[in-house]
Image (cartoon, rainbow, N blue to C red):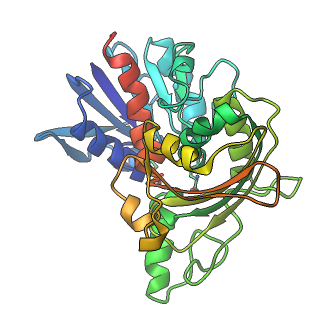
Amino acid sequence: MRVAIVGATGLVGGTFLKVLEERDLGITDLLLFASSRSAGKKVNFRGKEYTVEELNEDSFKGRGIDIALFSAGGGTSLKYAPLAAQEGVLVIDNSSAWRMHEDVPLVVPEVNPEAALQHKGIIANPNCSTIQCMAPLKALEKYGIKRVVYSTYQAVSGTGYKGVQDLEEGLKGNPPKTYPHQIVNNCLPHIDVFLEDGYTKEEKKMVDETRKILGLPNLPVTATCVRVPVMNSHSVSINVELENDFDIEEVKRELAQTNGVVLLDRVAENIYPLANDATGKDEVFVGRVRRDNSVKYGINLWTVADNIRKGAATNAVQIAELFSKGM
Ligand code: A2P
Ligand code: 11C
């Protein structure tokens, strides 16, 4: 399989390479693309040196590329993903550009792998904070999901290298260059741009993407997304109201058996999911599973995942794996 990475020099792009080295996608050749700033840069993959090329309109023409993993921002995906698809390349796009397009499946492989088969050349990778909530919610589907309330605690790596830099420099006493306020000692209730209704785009993504992935277009969902001074791995508190009664111990057993989920819920031993522990891992960690007694049938969950791995690179590679056998 000939695989291309668009945005190969970025935080997610670099993690694509790491995840591809760890897993067996059957790669026979690798093509790396980024902006003109990185053209000519050398990158090592499985002991071989590859040269980064500047992305242009001809990058996909006659190159025999099977799959292209994109993570170079929405503008780049909007322009270049259709050009790649036109050349017969299957694009797996990590940006938000195509996620809500009706011809573009939005896929978390443990949750809705069948949707991927409907693709017309582009498959979208969901937002990192959405991805980590999907398998836990899927596990609750049998009780009927009535309403979801998300509160997120998102790491600076979600902003890419620039976010990481703001936290690192902030810890040395330097002012922020990317966030509107210092991130050190602060929680910023502001991720992505503000929309007219007072929500942020990140919050809207969580609402829209949850409905699309779970196939519940009218599900009441609300979100408050917060940037916290954590280097990597997002945490999300999920409050779920259910239609039907449940046994909390049974729910824990079901979560523990859910593909891609690790239950870490032994509070007597202070064991619950933590960002530091999730970093470098591919699973979604779930804990603090407890009944919400303020409604008839409600549950609170705490989920943590590496936003650059499961929230981006790993999920995209897992989507590619759905196709690698048949190609
Ligand atoms: P470059 O390193 O040449 O700027 P991050 O999210 O970590 O900031 O990474 C963004 C990635 O997207 C980088 O690899 C970056 O390349 C790439 N990128 C940004 N703009 C473009 C563009 N117009 N064309 C191709 N790649 C781009
Ligand atoms: C963040 N979730 O933490 C964002 C990053 O739509 O893919 C990913 C944005 C997106 O800032």
The residue at the point 46 percent across, 67 percent down is: 164
Q: Position of residue 271 (x, y in %)?
A: 43, 67
Classify residue 172 by image quadrant: bottom left
The residue at the point 31 percent across, 26 percent down is: 3
The residue at the point 37 percent across, 46 percent down is: 282
**Which residue reaches farthest left?**
47
For the residue pair 305 and 99, the one nearer the viewer reads as 305
Against 277, residue 56 (above or below) is above
For the residue pair 56 and 185, the one nearer the viewer reads as 185
Q: Position of residue 37 (x, y in %)?
A: 39, 50
**Which residue reaches farthest bottom?**
173
Q: Position of residue 182 (x, y in %)?
A: 60, 80
Classify residue 131 by image quadrant: top right
Against 303, residue 164 (above or below) is below
* Number of disc labels: 0
Position of 4 compared to 272: left or right? left
Q: Position of residue 24 (x, y in %)?
A: 23, 29
For the residue pair 293 and 27, the one nearer the viewer reads as 293
Classify residue 219 by image quadrant: top right
Quadrant into which the C terminus falls = top left
User: Is residue 102 among the parts visible in the rendering?
Assistant: yes
Against 139, residue 272 (above or below) is below
For the residue pair 52 and 6, the one nearer the viewer reads as 6
Position of 247 compared to 261: left or right? right
Position of 144 compared to 152: left or right? right
Quadrant into which the N terminus falls = top left
User: Is residue 55 among the parts visible in the rendering?
Assistant: no
